[in-house]
Image (cartoon, rainbow, N blue to C red):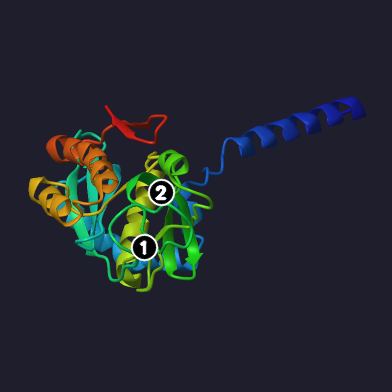
């Protein structure tokens, strides 16, 4: 065998080996994979995920493909997690969590330092697996409406988090945030780019609005703001599907 044939055969062997190795592709890292690199998230999955999947199965929810929606009611100190299997249109209430501490009063957040928990239509913008409050999910406050209506420095870093202390955030205790956090991770991992978080002063059904209207009768701007939120609240309450939310030039929410 001459040198030319030897070189040719070596090149063929290299090409074959390269082709063979390329056929074994490394699986792409998912959002869930990335999150589970963090010890607290990994521990939360180990502690909570099987239990959550069992509960989903009991409720007829597909644990391998679902979207989530979070409703928060400040007066009632409740955070509700609603879930929709991807093959279904309607959300169903999965679990309710007690908000263990609060700050401020009923009404929206309009500036930094006002101690307020925002009110309005938001989504999760930040997953923080190394939070000072165990785990935290940041909402996209200030949203477009807040930027129009608010004044000066609006503040930020509004989180749903662990622990039981707050200045304008939504604390659920470490135990509960483990569940909410990994449910949000699962939703994101299933392709849900925005996990909606809608924050209301209270349940805005007929009775709820009547109580608010009576107690805050002298604050017409606040009542009008809540009436605007009620349109979005009613849409979901009636249909169990999420409205499409937009914002007009005055900062008012528009629903379709």
Q: Nearer the viewer, residue 38 or 219?
A: 219
Q: Nearer the viewer, residue 36 or 93?
A: 93
Quarter residue 196 falls in: top left
The residue identified by callout 2 is 124
Callout count: 2
Residue 63 visible somewhere in the drawing: no
Task: Locate the N terminus and report the quarter of the image it occupies.
Answer: top right
At x 46%, y 54%, the residue is 111
Quarter residue 96 falls in: bottom left
Residue 88: image location, x then y, percent: 20, 34
Residue 198: image location, x then y, percent: 30, 47
Who comes first in sequence, dot 2 or dot 1? Answer: 1
Left of 74 or right of it: where is 21?
right
Q: Is residue 75 above or below residue 8?
A: below
Residue 250 visible somewhere in the drawing: yes
At x 44%, y 49%, the residue is 141
The residue identified by callout 1 is 45
Q: Nearer the viewer, residue 170 or 220?
A: 220
């Amino acid at each position: 065998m001459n040198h030319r044939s030897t070189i040719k055969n070596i090149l063929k062997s290299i090409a074959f080996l390269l082709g063979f190795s390329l056929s074994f592709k490394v699986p792409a890292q998912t959002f869930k994979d990335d999150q589970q690199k963090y010890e607290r998230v990994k521990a939360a999955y180990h502690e909570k995920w099987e239990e959550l999947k069992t509960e989903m199965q009991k409720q007829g929810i597909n644990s391998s493909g679902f979207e989530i929606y979070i409703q928060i009611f400040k007066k009632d100190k409740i955070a509700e997690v609603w879930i929709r299997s991807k093959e279904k249109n309607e959300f169903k209430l999965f679990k309710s969590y007690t908000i263990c501490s609060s700050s401020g009063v009923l009404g929206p957040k309009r500036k930094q330092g006002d101690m307020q928990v925002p009110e309005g239509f938001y989504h999760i913008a930040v997953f923080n697996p190394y939070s000072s409050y165990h785990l935290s999910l940041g909402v996209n406050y200030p949203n477009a409406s807040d930027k129009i209506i608010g004044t000066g420095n609006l503040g930020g870093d509004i989180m749903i988090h662990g622990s039981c202390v707050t200045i304008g955030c939504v604390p659920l205790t470490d135990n509960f945030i483990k569940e909410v956090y990994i449910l949000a991770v699962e939703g994101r991992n299933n392709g849900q780019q925005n996990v909606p978080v809608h924050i209301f002063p209270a349940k805005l059904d007929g009775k709820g609005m009547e109580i608010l209207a009576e107690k805050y009768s002298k604050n017409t701007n606040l009542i009008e703001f809540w009436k605007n939120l009620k349109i979005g609240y009613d849409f979901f309450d009636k249909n169990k599907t999420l409205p499409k939310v937009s914002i007009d030039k005055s900062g008012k929410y528009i629903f379709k």
